[in-house]
Amino acid sequence: MYPPKHHQDYNAENIKSVAEAYPFAVLVSADNNIPFITHAPLILKEEKLIGHIDANNPHVKLLKNNYPITAVFQGPQTYISPTIYTTKQLPTWNYIISHAKGIVKEITDPDIIKKSMVDMTDFLENVDHGFRLSVDDPRMDRLVPYIHCFEIEVEHWEGKFKLSQDKIPDDIENAKQELIRNNQKNVADFVNGLFERHF
């Protein structure tokens, strides 16, 4: 990412928090100048990102053997109108993004694969739903041959949090509230409209 210093976040916990709060990642690899891009949830465990995708995905050939990879986690983002500021400004776009760069290894042990699926479910499941996945569930054994499980050993985290940091405190607060407000409204409007058109 282009890193103007005032938009960079160097706090590792802040950067990782984006991956934990928004775990649906964009996985990016390249092979002979051909990009491979896959979307998949990842969970962070002991400085490693764990995930699994369909074994038939052509990206699988690059998700092994210590191949380099970047995982992109996008948090909230929005257009910022100058009208929300107390001072005269130009339009901009604010966003919260983390990149994890590292090397990827394939996981082939069926027991570890099943355990990773249980761990991911435990992390993602809403506590109010009360669902628990068990490694002893016979459906797990039938599923394992059809998934490719992998772990990314993260070598570098990068965070770009463009949050109007170069503005006065009142305008920073206004931009924060706009980021919250627009994301809540935009998600509801978009999802409702998409469902109306799709179904």
Image (cartoon, rainbow, N blue to C red):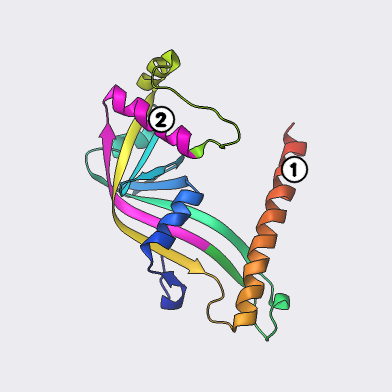
How many labels, in total?
2
Which residue is denoted by mark 2 in the rendering?
117
Left or right for 181, reference 97: right
Residue type, numbered disc 1: Asn
The answer to whether residue 121 is magenta is yes
Q: How far apart are labels 2 and 1 at the CA level? A: 30 Å
**Which circle, 2 or 1, is nearer the viewer?**
2
Give the farthest residue toward the bottom. Answer: 88
State the extent of the magenta-drawn residues as a range: 96-123
Q: Quadrant of residue 118?
A: top left
Asked if 49 appears above or below 172 in the picture, the reply is above
- Badge 1 marks a residue whose secondary structure is helix
On the question of residue 57 being in view, the answer is: no
Q: Which residue is mark 1?
A: 192
Q: Which mark is residue 2?
A: none
Where's residue 173, x and y in %?
Answer: 63, 74
**Residue at x-position 43% and y-position 35%:** 120
| Label 2 element class | helix
Q: Position of residue 91 (x, y in %)?
A: 65, 75
